[in-house]
Image (cartoon, rainbow, N blue to C red):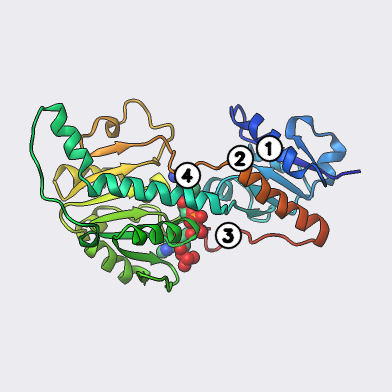
Amino acid sequence: MKPVIPFVPEANSHEQEVWQRDLAKALEAFAHVKHVSDLTDEDRLNAKVAIVANPNPADVAALPNLVWVQSLWAGVERLMTELPAGGPLIVRLADPQMAETMSEAVVAWTLYLHRDMPRYMMQQRQAVWQEHFLKTPAERTIGVLGLGNLGSASAQRLVANGFKVLGWSRSEKNLDGIECFGGPEGLTRVLEQSDILVVLTPLTTETRGMLGAAAFQKCKRGAALINFARGPIVDTGALLAALDQGHLSHAVLDVFDEEPLPTQSPLWHHDKITVLPHISAPTITSTASKIVADHIHQYLTEGAIPHHVDRNRGY
Ligand code: NAP
């Protein structure tokens, strides 16, 4: 009989049916994917691995013999805080398709800023016909904070589009065509030189509030920010102050302290802020399901647990 793999999605998520269908199909040759609400007591006791997506922690705790969980998201900040430290290992989703999707978004919104689109949209609203001086991509320095799966693919795609690219990560990297930095001093160097900053670090105790008043002071006057990682990495009050003082020129925000962004938030109507509803790199169910299936197949046949989150490091 095929082993049962519990699927523990976020309650009321409208996407769970699509996931359940694609996961069941990807695993059908060797396992039976069962929604958490359909599990028997025996299924719960036997489960060594589960597939989770923003699960209710109580649903995970009700699987007492879990060794690891496969998250369907790349960011696992919430799981890290909600699952106990001695609990199952957490494997996050690293999908090459997601890196493609994210790097496409990074290029799209970098071009939006590079070609002054917010300013021209504003001019249209005011019926103003005015041309502004155009820089070439080579004259624009883009700083990418975080050079993991998503950041390194994005940085490389920016280089391919002709931009000068600086990268920053915890351990210093060596990437073709990208000047790489590490550590707090490295961050200062990147902030000081970048015309556009792209945030792609995970949210950890070290990165929470990392971009606040002190960091913005180090930025070039007129620099712009793209946050595609997690809202709390940026101090919203300090960002609003830097935009209102004209120190920063624009921010493209896809992620927020509270999501959905509350309707009363001042960010919605700020002239220098572009609000996106967390859409820069959605998980693609078909490709992600195949990766999840490979991980679980390797575990069932060889006992191999995929690369998992380091709780001390926080990602
Ligand atoms: P990843 O592969 O774990 O890469 C994280 C990168 O950040 C690494 O380069 C890491 O440095 C660096 N980093 C972590 N902590 C740091 C610190 N304290 N100082 C300097 N650098 C630090 O993660 P990923 O898959 O690229 O994803 C990044 C984040 O994107 C996720 O955590 C998630 O929050 C976000 N995300 C957003 C969306 C969206 O739609 N908006 C979609 C997917 C993911 P090392 O290389 O030295 O370890």
User: Residue 22, labelled with which disc?
Assistant: 1
* Mark 3 or mark 1: whose residue is earlier in sequence: 1
Disc 4/disc 1 C-alpha distance (Å): 19 Å
Whether residue 228 is visible here, answered yes or no, is: no
**Proximity of marks 3 and 1: CB atoms separated by less than 8 Å:** no
The residue carrying mark 2 is: 285
Left or right placement of residue 84 versus residue 104 in this view: right
**Proximity of marks 4 and 2: CB atoms separated by less than 8 Å:** no
Number of callouts = 4
User: Residue 188, labelled with which disc?
Assistant: none
Q: 165 or 85: which is nearer to us?
A: 165
Disc 2/disc 1 C-alpha distance (Å): 7 Å
Q: Residues within 10 Å of mark 4 (few under 14, many from 20)?
A: many
Looking at the picture, which amino acid does disc 1 mark?
Asp
Q: Residues within 10 Å of mark 1 (few under 14, many from 20)?
A: some
Q: Position of residue 32 (x, y in %)?
A: 81, 40
Q: 273 or 99: which is nearer to us?
A: 99
Disc 2/disc 3 C-alpha distance (Å): 27 Å
**Proximity of marks 2 and 1: CB atoms separated by less than 8 Å:** yes
Q: Position of residue 295 (x, y in %)?
A: 71, 54
Q: 246 or 148: which is nearer to us?
A: 148
Q: 27 or 187: which is nearer to us?
A: 27
* Mark 2 or mark 3: whose residue is earlier in sequence: 2
Label 4 residue SS: loop
User: Residue 281, labelled with which disc?
Assistant: 4
* Mark 2 or mark 1: whose residue is earlier in sequence: 1
Disc 4/disc 3 C-alpha distance (Å): 24 Å
* Mark 4 or mark 3: whose residue is earlier in sequence: 4
Q: Is mark 1 within 8 Å of ligand 1?
A: no
User: Residue 311, labelled with which disc?
Assistant: 3
Q: Is mark 4 within 8 Å of ligand 1?
A: yes
Q: Position of residue 260 (x, y in %)?
A: 43, 31
